[in-house]
Image: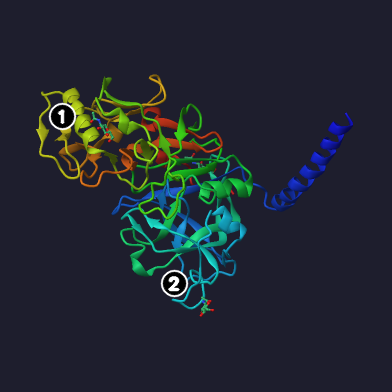
Amino acid sequence: MALSFHITLVCSIFFFFMIYPSIAKTSSNNKPKALVLPVTKDSSTKQYLTQLSQRTPLVPIKLTVDLGAPFLWANCDVGYVSSTYKPARCGSAQCSLADTNDCRDCFEFPPGPGCFNNTCRLYPENTINGQTLITGVVSHDTLSLQSTNGFNPSKFVTVPKSIFVCSESRLGTLDDLASGVTGMAGLGRTKISLPSQFASAFRFPKKFAICLSSSTTSNGVMFFGDGPYVLLPGLDVSKNLIFTPLIRNPVSTASSPQKEEPSSEYFIRVKSVKINGKTVPLNKTLLTIDSAGFGGTKISTVKPYTELEASIYNKFISVFEKQVGNHVPKVAPVAPFGLCYKSKSFDSTRVGAAVPPIDLVLQKKSVFWRIFGANSMVQVSNEVVCVGFVKAREDFPPKTPIIIGAHQLEDNLLQFDLDHSRLGFSSTLLSRQTTCANFNFTSNA
Ligand SMILES: *[C@@H]1O[C@H](CO)[C@@H](O)[C@H](O)[C@H]1NC(C)=O
Ligand SMILES: *[C@@H]1O[C@H](CO)[C@@H](O)[C@H](O)[C@H]1NC(C)=O
Ligand SMILES: *[C@@H]1O[C@H](CO)[C@@H](O)[C@H](O)[C@H]1NC(C)=O
């Protein structure tokens, strides 16, 4: 009894001191429950971009969204002016959060953002063209974005000391990124990705959602924090999600990993693929992640179309073709696709061309992600539609045989719940008469 009283007292004192500073810190900030960012589909590169504000005074920065990337990186050696910029000194809390003790000095440039002595480094990757960019200085600065009640954007909030990696603009770090973009926004499974940092700054659930618009003229949306996520005409798409576990790949999937670490990307367990209910006879070994990190299924916003390992692709296309039937004539394929038809061969429905539905069967038979025409087919010209899946390189097979790409994600809401390591997905919102372009971006602040 005396002992338990003692422990209770010690615990209360401990918790008082643990919690008190956070109350003091956030009360002035009027703690938001969720944050919101627009996601634009760039018309020339088809990359998905977002924009937030950084530095003091604040400057808008445009970034390519990379769902699986470990952190935000941005060029900051040219024209970077900020009174709140700080590099992370070796051994600091930021370096340990970033999980790096790769400490370096800088001789190449005058001191300034991107070049300081005794700073820890990470390796930003341009995942659009696969280039790893020498090194970048782990840094922090103020970020600013809008809070939301799930219906509209609301007041701007600032995230002080937000960690990012400063890259250099020489060496073509921005090659192949959309015009105006100065880096990439990583939403991956690390402590320094944007979702993790926002959740810990405002103590909301470690959840975020992404909804990519198929249109290059109306914005899609990203939410950080829990729902509601409301799309016009008033549908809360955080409800009625289907859930599947997020799988950890124990081995980095970066193009040139610098150390042994788990992948920051989001993997799910696809157990089989069905087209019109017919199982695609694929090599099951490829569907599980082995101890070297090969195998499995991941989700990507930087691959425009779902990419399948060659043997999977061939079987997939042959089953699709059979399910469409011989009575529908094929036309010459248009690269990068391998199977195309005349558009007028298919009726058009609310969920796209009336083609055989594709099911990614997940943890059990009754749980599947159904892909309809709007997400399976790509209109390549007025007359021609193609099956919007591509074959991975055969000479250099990918580590991950199924990479679900952006075209298949459009107008689907995906919620990544990192607290419970699960993915919630809506399947196509077109069947519910809304789209990812239907968030009301008029501020109610
Ligand atoms: C880093 O330290 C070296 C040696 O002391 C010095 O020459 C160099 O200018 C310093 N670089 C920066 C960016 O401060
Ligand atoms: C299935 O894939 C694994 C991994 O690539 C390979 O070792 C095996 O030979 C394949 N099995 C068949 C039947 O093709
Ligand atoms: C969008 O939100 C604004 C601000 O709350 C509101 O005035 C407007 O009616 C909304 N638009 C629609 C189409 O509901």
99, above or below 76, in the image: above
Q: Is residue 327 visible?
A: yes
210, above or below 63, in the image: above
Which residue is labeled 2 in the image?
78
Depth check, mark 1 against mark 2: the one in front is: 2
Residue 26 percent coordinates (x, y): 69, 50
Q: Which element type, helix, strand or loop, lies under badge 2?
A: loop
Please identify the quarter of the rendering in which residue 221 is found: top left
Please indicate whether residue 54 sits to the left or right of residue 378 in the image. right
Query: Mark 1 near mark 2, Cβ–Cβ under 8 Å?
Result: no
Depth check: give the residue in front, 232 or 289.
289
Tell me, for residue 407, which label it has, or none.
none
Residue 10 percent coordinates (x, y): 82, 41
Q: How many labels does the image show?
A: 2
Please indicate whether residue 118 sits to the left or right of residue 383 in the image. right
Crowd tier of the residue under label 2, counting other residues whose Cα lies within 10 Å: few below 14, some 14–19, many 20 or above: few
Please indicate whether residue 305 sits to the left or right of residue 122 in the image. left
Residue at horizontal 24 percent and vertical 25 percent from the top: 281
Amino acid at circle 2: Val
Residue at horizontal 20 percent and vertical 26 percent from the top: 319
Depth check: give the residue in front, 260 or 406.
260
Residue 162 percent coordinates (x, y): 57, 57
Which residue is labeled 1 in the image?
345
Residue 21 percent coordinates (x, y): 74, 51
Q: Can residue 233 be seen in this view?
A: no
Q: Which element type, helix, strand or loop, lies under badge 1?
A: helix
